[in-house]
Amino acid sequence: MEEKTEKVKSEAVQIIEAFEVLPKLVVFDLDYTLWPFYCECRSKREIPSLYPHAKGILLALKEKGIDIAIASRSPTADIATAFLNKLNLTPMFVSQEIYSSWTHKTDHFQRIHSRTSVPFNSMLFFDDENRNIQAVIHTYLLLTFLSMKIKDGVRRFTIIHVLHTHTHTFDVNSLDHHRCLKWE
Ligand SMILES: [Mg+2]
C-alpha cells in the first residue's frame, strides 16, 4: 500500500474508533464522490484515479468491520465497472448498484437493502448531488445522510462529521452544507 494511503487509513481508523455507534454500511456514489470525473466521458482504456483520500477511507471502514457499497446512476456501467476493477476495488464492496434510473437512487437502495439486509437507519450515504439524497430521504426517512458539497471528495473531516451525525438523532432540516464547506 502507498505510504500516503496508509497514513490516511490509520488516521481514519483512529477517528472511527473514537465513536461508540457506527454505521453497518456506508454507500458511496461514484462520479465526483469517489473519483473526480464522469465515467461516461472517459474511455475504458484509461487508467483512472480516485480522489486522494478515498482509498485510505474505504480501507479504514473495512478494517473496522463496516461494509461498503456503491449506488451510481452512471449510464456507462461497463466503464464504471472496468475502472473499479483497475483500481482493485471491486472485492471491497458488498453490493455494486450501477445503472441509470428515473427514480434517482431509491431503487438502488432497495436493492442494497435486499442484498445486505442492513436496515436503512444503519446506512450512511455519500453523494455529491442533492437530488439523489433528497429522493432517498423522501422514501426512507430513517436513512442518515450527508451531502458532500466539497470539491475533492471523501476526506477525513467528512468521516468525523458523518460519525458525529450518526450518533445523534438527526434532523434532515438541520443539514448545514456551508459548515461542510468551511471544514475544508
Ligand atoms: Mg456523483
Image (cartoon, helix red, strand yellow):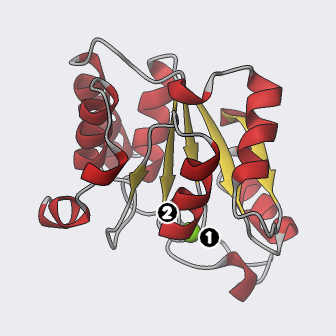
Mark 2 crowdedness (10 Å alpha carbons): few <14, some 14-19, many ≥20: many
Question: Ligand 1 appears in which quadrant?
Answer: bottom right
Label 1 belongs to which residue?
48
Q: Is residue 33 left or right of residue 103?
A: left
| Residue at position x 31%, y 68% in the image | 150
Is residue 88 visible from the viewing direction of this image?
no
Query: Quick check: is the Cβ at mark 1 less than 8 Å away from ligand 1?
Result: no
Is residue 182 visible from the viewing direction of this image?
yes
Q: Quadrant of residue 47?
A: bottom right
Mark 1 crowdedness (10 Å alpha carbons): few <14, some 14-19, many ≥20: some
Q: Is residue 124 left or right of residue 136?
A: left
Q: Position of residue 82 (x, y in %)?
A: 80, 62
Label 2 belongs to which residue?
33
Please, which residue is most extreme toward the left here? 182
Q: Nearer the viewer, residue 181 or 57?
A: 181
Q: Secondary structure at mark 1?
A: loop
The amino acid on which the numbered mark 2 sits, given as a three-letter code, is Thr
Q: Is residue 171 left or right of residue 57?
A: left
Q: Position of residue 88 (x, y in %)?
A: 68, 47
Query: Quick check: is the Cβ at mark 2 less than 8 Å away from ligand 1?
Result: yes
* Nearer the camera: disc 2 or disc 1: 2
| Residue at position x 59%, y 57% in the image | 29
Q: Secondary structure at mark 2?
A: loop
CA–CA distance between discs 2 and 1? 14 Å
| Residue at position x 18%, y 67% in the image | 178
Relative vertical location of residue 143 with respect to residue 104 in this rendering, above or below: above
